[in-house]
Image (cartoon, rainbow, N blue to C red):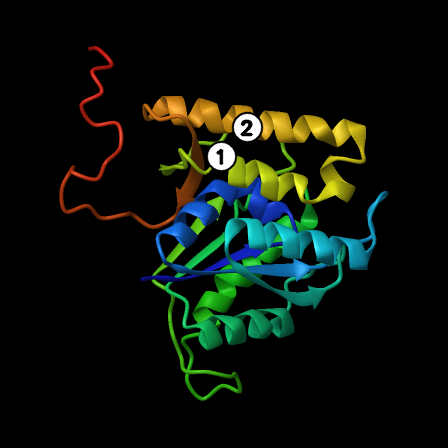
Amino acid sequence: MARILVFGPHPDDQELGMGGTIARLSKQGHDVVLVDMTDGEPTPHGDPETRAQEAAAAAEILGVRRVQIGLRNRFVEHTIEARHVVAGIIREHQADILFVPYWEDAHPDHRAVTRIVEDARFDAKLTKIDLPGEPIYPRWVFHYYCTHLRIIPQPSFLMDITGFEQQKHDSIVAYKSQFVLPEKNRRVVEWVASAGHYFGSRIGVAAAEPFFAREPLGLTGLEGVVGVGLGLGA
C-alpha cells in the first residue's frame, strides 16, 4: 500500500479539494497523512483552539491522521527552511505520493505551499544533508483543486468518489467556524458538492474529484479506466 502525504495551506483545504479521495484511499488501506502548513487562523469566527478541534474531527471522519508544520497563516513564504522542514516530513514518512494544491491560485499561501512541497520533493532525496530519515524521492506529485480563482479545472484525471460523498460533506462541515457559522460560506459546501456531481458525470459515475499531473501516468491496459464502454455516442 502507498504512503501518502496530502499538504494543505490551511486546515480544510484538503477536505474541500479532495475529501472524497482521501476517504477512499484510507478505506483502501493506504497510509494517508494530512499535513497542515498553518493553523489557518485568524478568521472571523475561529481561533487556533477551535480550528484545531475542527481539523481533528475532520481527520477522524475521513479515517486519517494529520500533523501541523506551524508556518504563519497569511505569511507563508518559499524559503530553504520551510523546504527542509517539509523534506524532513517526506523522509520520515517515506512518502510515495504527494498531493498539493493546484499552483495557479489567487491566495499567496496556496502558491507558496505548492512551490515549497515541489522543491522539498527534490531536497528529500539528497544525501549529505542535515535532515531526518533516509533519502527518498516520492514517485508522484498530484495537484488537487482548491483555488481562490474562478477558473474551470482542466484535470489530467478524475477520481471516482462514489460512496464517499457524505464523508467529504461531513469533513467539511466539521469546520463549523468556517462553513456553518458564516452564512455566506454555506454556499461553498453546496457548490463543492455540485462540482463533484458534475465531474462524476464526465466519467459516468455519481461523483468525482479532479486532479492534475505534471508528469505522465502509465497504464498497462484499459481494465481499470472508469468510463470505458459507456456508450456515449459517436
Q: Depth check: 32 or 85 in front?
A: 32
Specify whether residue 162 is in view.
Answer: yes
**Which residue is at a point 57% across and 45% down the rendered structure image?**
15
* Residue 143, placed above or below residue 34: above
- Which quadrant does the N terminus fall into? bottom left
Estimate the x, y position of residue 230 in percent, counting from the top left: 22, 20
Specify whether residue 114 is in view.
Answer: no
**Which residue is at a point 49% across and 44% down the rendered structure image?**
144
Query: Label 2 to label 1, Cα distance in Å?
Result: 8 Å
Quickly name the residue at label 1.
Answer: 165
Left or right position of 141 against 11: left
Q: Depth check: 120 or 51 in front?
A: 51
Estimate the x, y position of residue 24 in percent, counting from the top left: 41, 46
Q: Secondary structure at mark 2?
A: helix
Q: Are marks 2 and 1 in contact (CB under 8 Å)?
A: yes
* Numbered circle sitting on residue 193: 2
* Residue 18, placed above or below residue 233: below
Tell me the crowding category of disc 2: few under 14, some 14 to 19, or many 20 or more residues within 10 angstroms, Cα based: some
- Which quadrant does the C terminus fall into? top left
